[in-house]
Image: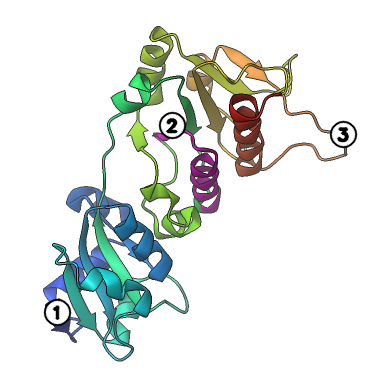
Amino acid sequence: MRTQQITSLSNARVKQWVQLKERKYRNKEGLFIAEGIHLVQEALRSKAKVHSIVYDMELGLPSELQEWAHKGMDVEWIEVNDAIIRKCTDTETPQPVFAIIQKPGADYRLLLEANKPLVIVVDGVQDPGNLGTIIRSADAVGATGVVIGKGSVDLYNSKTVRSTMGSLFHLPIVEADLTTLLPEVKGQGIHVVSTSLQASHTCYSYDFTQPTWFVVGNEGKGVSSEVSLLVEDHILIPMKGHAESLNVAMATTVMLYEALRQREFAL
């Protein structure tokens, strides 16, 4: 393992890393930051395109990452001081390591060509924690992938990345214009479905064993009117208590696990 050492906040590399905290620079460079031991581990395990691993020189490389340091991987190992770690990360008490990773750019055709796909389509979700949880739940049930429409929070926002707990490295995630993509999806015989309080059928009577793309919408406004016109099936999550609705991430998880039950555990 060959290491470099950087100690100045004025270093050009440090300035580049700091810029990656902003969406426009992440898009320009095609890179993002993953903070913390667990996320860096998951990136390496999943063979993500890791460019650099940056760690605190005083604490040394975390023991959990030692095995990768001696594998001859095409990764830069860079020692820095605590001031640089704090400058480049967003958490109040940052972990002593982060990675610079190439955005994967999955192809939506992989999702179209899958056998009986189960895909989550995100339309305008704004909260990073919600998007991260949706991706984590999709990963947990073995969904085919996730599509993120325009107007949604950035997948590579540091809070979103942390909320996925590494799941963004485990399944294809596509960013797309839903008004262009969904007509093509429907043309492939795939069912596009969403929830509605006015629906006459519950999620428990819907057939999730068929090819399904499930659309979830904004926390306050729901699915946009443009995308709603492209949804062909509407279903309802039944609620017996007094709550008016479920959080979008929770509702998505309920749907995903009903789909998993039907596909893998039906009697």
Picture coordinates of residue 265 (x, y %)? Answer: 65, 30
* Image point (23%, 67%), residue name: 17
Picture coordinates of residue 257 (x, y %)? Answer: 63, 35
- Furthest-right residue in view? 241
Q: Which mark is residue 219?
A: none
* Image point (19%, 77%), residue name: 78
Disc 3 target residue: 240
Q: Dividing the picture into quarters, in which one does residue 81 lie?
A: bottom left
Above or below, comparing residue 201 to residue 51 in the picture: above
- Furthest-bottom residue in view? 58
Disc 1 target residue: 3
Residue type at numbered disc 3: Lys
Q: What's the coloring here? A: rainbow
Characterize the local packing of mark 2: few (<14), some (14-19) or many (20 or more) Cα atoms within 10 angstroms.
many
| Membership of 68 in magenta stretch | no
Q: Secondary structure at mark 2?
A: loop
Mark nearer the viewer, 2 or 3: 2
Disc 2 target residue: 144
Characterize the local packing of mark 1: few (<14), some (14-19) or many (20 or more) Cα atoms within 10 angstroms.
few
Which residues fall within the magenta stretch? 129-150
User: Is residue 161 left or right of 241 when viewed as pictured?
Assistant: left
